[in-house]
Image (cartoon, rainbow, N blue to C red):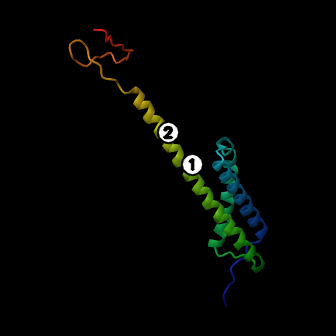
Amino acid sequence: MAIAAPAIADATELFAVAGDLTGLLERETRLVRTLQIAEIAPLQTDKARLVELLRKFLKQFEGGAKLPPSAKQKWGVLGQRLVTAAAENERALRIGRTATERLIGAVISAVRQSRRPHATYSPKKRASSDLTVAGVALDRRL
């Protein structure tokens, strides 16, 4: 006789955690896309807490726990919404990180370009150690 796997006692809590995490990921994605970066940081503590709670629920599945039959369909819908929100969130964060890295690279390049020494010559026809550039006027009256 086979022993039935234990059921998750309260699927309502699993659904609440999944729903809260989905909503938070969707909100974070909107904030990233609208460049409201300062509003993202406060979400991170709650995001970490919800991810950890969900991880605990999912470990129960690894241990053989099962959802009651009445909850399986709801979990399918919620789980798909969570997967979609997580994928969109990851994509938005990746795009934001790439854009930030490009911007920083462009700023660094511009600073390096502006600090590049300008070659000048001294009366001895050697490169001058004085790299400051002054305005030059040519007298063409000769």
Q: Position of residue 69 (x, y in %)?
A: 75, 80
Farthest-out residue, left: 124
Picture layout, residue 74 above or below residue 19: below
Amino acid type, residue under disc 1 in the picture: Gly
Residue at the (70%, 53%) spot, across then down: 27
Amino acid type, residue under disc 2 in the picture: Ile
Q: Is 101 in front, or is 64?
A: 101
Q: Position of residue 6 (x, y in %)?
A: 71, 77
Residue annotated with mark 1: 96
Q: Position of residue 1 (x, y in %)?
A: 67, 91
Q: CA distance from mark 1 to mark 2?
A: 12 Å
* Left/right of residue 123 with respect to residue 7 in the rendered view: left
Q: Are the residues tagged 1 and 2 within 8 Å (C-beta)?
A: no
- Give the image quarter of residue 36: top right
Picture layout, residue 4 above or below residue 37: below
Residue annotated with mark 2: 104
Neighbor class of circle 1 (other Cα within 10 Å; few <14, some 14-19, many 20+) is: some
N-terminal of the two: label 1 or label 2?
A: 1
